[in-house]
Image (cartoon, rainbow, N blue to C red):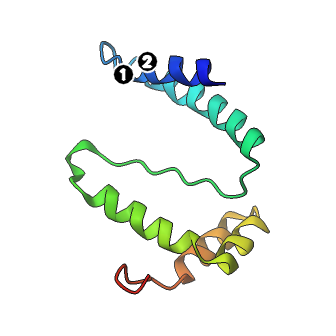
Amino acid sequence: MMQRWNRWVRFWSHEEHPISLAAVRVFLGLVLLFDFLQMAQLGVVTLLFAPEEAGVDHLKALALIARTMRDEEICTKLRSTTDLTTLHAILTDAPIRDSKAA
């Protein structure tokens, strides 16, 4: 597994053809994610895309995701459904937690 991971990291670090390799990188990432999910038996996975010019907004989003995922009730609800509308409702109804209170 570590050999595959090291190859993946090296592959992502090459910036010679970022646009032409994007689809291949995403596909390989999904394959590795699937392997990891089977190995770790995770129930919830979050994927966050952010443009380069977003600054620290992606860090704020990750912090909000982390605070939300600490709530066992929300995680249980997310694991129990595959309906996109229900997933959206669960996530948008989740209370926004203040980082200082957590």
Q: What residue appears at the point 71 percent right and 43 percent down from the top-left corner?
A: 37
Tell me if 94 is positioned left or right of 87 in this view: left
| Along the line of sight, the residue nearer the viewer: 84 or 81 | 81
User: Where does the image place residue 9, in percent across and percent down from the top left?
Assistant: 46, 24
Q: What residue appears at the point 48 percent right and 73 percent down from the top-left corner?
A: 67
Is label 2 in contact with label 1 (beta carbons under 8 Å)? yes
Residue marked by disc 1: 13
Q: What residue appears at the point 52 percent right and 21 percent down from the top-left corner?
A: 6
Tell me if 91 is positioned left or right of 57 in this view: right
User: Where does the image place residue 84, in percent across and percent down from the top left?
Assistant: 67, 64
- Badge 2 crowding class, 10 Å Cα cut-off, few under 14, some 14 to 19, many 20 or more, is few
The kind of residue tagged 2 is Arg
Task: Using the rendered view, name the quadrant where residue 31 is placed.
Answer: top right
| Along the line of sight, the residue nearer the viewer: 58 or 102 | 102
Q: What residue appears at the point 52 percent right and 17 percent down from the top-left corner?
A: 7
Task: Using the rendered view, name the quadrant where residue 27 is placed.
Answer: top right
Residue marked by disc 2: 10
Q: Quadrant of the N terminus?
A: top right
- Badge 1 crowding class, 10 Å Cα cut-off, few under 14, some 14 to 19, many 20 or more, is few
Q: Quadrant of the C terminus?
A: bottom left
User: Where does the image place residue 17, in percent across and percent down from the top left?
Assistant: 33, 14
Q: Could you give the CA–CA distance between mark 2 and mark 1, rounded to whole angstroms?
A: 5 Å
Judge whether 79 appears above or below 15 on screen. below
Q: Secondary structure at mark 1?
A: helix
The kind of residue tagged 1 is Ser
